[in-house]
Image (cartoon, rainbow, N blue to C red):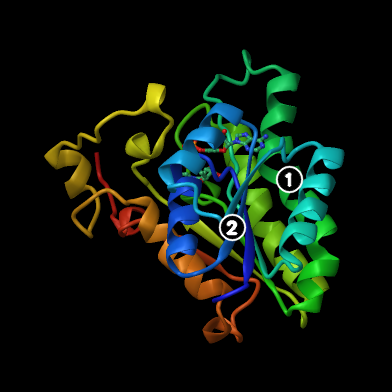
Amino acid sequence: MKNKTVIITGGAQGIGRGLVKSFLDEGWNVSAADIDGEAGLELVEVMKEDSRLSFFKCDVSAAMETEKMVADTAKKYGAINAVINNAGIGVNKNILELSIEEWNRVLAVNLTSVFLLAKFSRIHLEKNKGSIVNIASTRALMSEPNTEAYSASKGGVMALTHALSVSLGPLIRVNCISPGWIEVSDFKKKRDFKEPAHSEADKNQHPAGRVGAPSDIAQLALYLVSDKAGFITGQNFVVDGGMTKRMIYV
Ligand SMILES: NC(=O)c1ccc[n+]([C@@H]2O[C@H](COP(=O)([O-])OP(=O)(O)OC[C@H]3O[C@@H](n4cnc5c(N)ncnc54)[C@H](O)[C@@H]3O)[C@@H](O)[C@H]2O)c1
């Protein structure tokens, strides 16, 4: 993968940090864009100041910042081959208490950002027959109470994925990964770091027998942006250890 470049949004922590590590391990140049500058500095430290990694402090819901981050990435590496839209936030509140500002913020970070990244990186991806991977969620398919903004945003990501695949093909492929429960507490900046702890019940509700890890998402993302996946576009892939396939009678 020498000289191939990927933009990973929300790359400083969590699944994004795992994606950054896996792409660096596979020889990619990585542009990690994250709103959290403190986590970004730590990311660079954790990745041993790898010269192929650049951190950009960027709110991916803000058009001008995102346009600049994409342009700066292209300028630095000379090309953009893949974009992984991973940045995301949630809010758990009864709709009577959920403000319109909170609703709009979740939609802006989780969904509008995917539109902005596609808009600004299109010209670069087309030159290289590149690929976009959007991180949605199994919550696009099923819900707990009081998760309306998050679920709606992730359903939007899934629909935007197939819309973009039709509009941007054949030069750009666009796919979506929907993670289930992925443990990220040990992929956080130092002051939010926690050792993962899972009960037997946590593990057993997954037919795969365990909670997921960021590498479970990264391995599929690496495949989807590779030439091996050249006939796959517009699809959603659930990576949840089978959790959404287990029928529950309470
Ligand atoms: N962890 C899970 O179990 C799980 C399950 C399903 C889907 N997801 C999705 O995976 C993605 C990553 O989740 P995570 O658990 O790693 O979250 P996380 O909170 O650990 O990391 C998210 C990162 O995104 C960054 N971010 C937030 N808002 C941003 C913005 N406006 N601009 C740029 N960066 C921003 C944060 O600073 C953080 O570093 C999200 O889209 C999330 O919805 C996670």
Seen at 49% across and 47% down, the residue is: 49
* Left or right, residue 59 beside residue 215: right
- Above-or-below relation of 129 to 72: below
Q: Place residue 78 in its image quadrant.
A: bottom right
Residue at x-position 50% and y-position 53%: 50
Measure the alpha-carbon separation of dots 1 and 2: 18 Å
Identify the residue at image location x=59%, y=39%.
88
Please state the horizontal and vertical placement of residue 54, each as a whole percent of the image: 62, 49
Dots 1 and 2: beta carbons under 8 Å? no
Q: Which residue is mark 2?
A: 30
Q: Earlier in the sequence, mark 1 or mark 2?
A: 2
Q: Quadrant of residue 121?
A: bottom right
Q: Tell me the number on the disc at residue 113.
A: 1
Under mark 2, the amino acid is: Val
Residue type indicated by callout 1:
Ser
Within 8 Å: ligand 1 and the Cβ of disc 1? yes
* x 44%, y 55%: residue: 21
Q: Is residue 135 left or right of residue 211?
A: right
Is any atom of residue 139 visible in this view?
yes
Is 193 rendered above or below residue 56?
above
Residue placed most toward the observer, 15 or 28: 28
